[in-house]
Amino acid sequence: MIPLLSALIFAVFVGQAHAQTADPPTFSVGDEWKLSTGFARRVVKVDGDVTVFQGYPNCPKCLAFYDKNLTLLKIEQEAGTFLSLLGRSGTSARQDCSETLPSTTRT
């Protein structure tokens, strides 16, 4: 009898569990992260739902544009050209900026 009652009470309380959600992170200009590898990333601009970070793996002066869900939108090199992310896997997009990657000039 006690095991049946315990199981019934357990089932009632488990059914009342609520899903937890979290809002996307918020960033402020000047926020900075430094890794032990020497890599640093700093927030340089927040414009609505777009956050711009300076610093990208192997390209410390590149600007990386992310939406509010931290989806990479584009990477701008120091010279003002944008790296093409279309058709590239995540690892290909992280190649050294000094390599020849397809780019387009800002208009």
Image (spheres, rainbow, N blue to C red):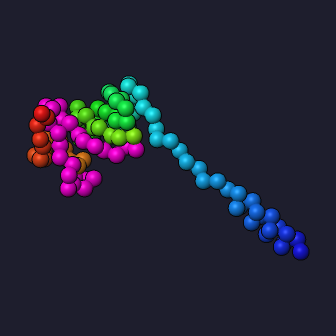
Asked if residue 42 shows in the view, the reply is no
Q: Residue at x 32, y 27 (%)?
A: 44
Residue lying farthest to the right in this orientation = 1
**Residue 28 against residue 12 in the figure, above or below:** above
Where residue 66 sits, quadrant-wise, is top left
Residue 24 pos. (x, y %):
46, 41
**Residue 23 against residue 46 in the figure, above or below:** below
Q: Residue at x 74, y 66 (%)?
A: 11
| Range covered by the magenta-colored residues | 69-92
Q: Residue at x 31, y 33 (%)?
A: 52
Where residue 89 sits, quadrant-wise, is bottom left
Where residue 36 sits, quadrant-wise, is top left
Q: Residue at x 71, y 57 (%)?
A: 16
Front residue of 78 and 4:
4
Residue 83 pos. (x, y %):
17, 43
Quarter of the figure with the N terminus: bottom right
Front residue of 78 and 104:
104
Asked if residue 64 shows in the view, the reply is yes
**Total number of numbered discs in the rendering:** 0
Whether residue 81 appears in magenta in the rendering, the answer is yes
Whether residue 51 appears in magenta in the rendering, the answer is no
Left-right relation of 25 to 47: right
Residue 26 pos. (x, y %):
45, 34
Residue lying farthest to the top in this orientation = 30
Residue 47 pos. (x, y %):
34, 30
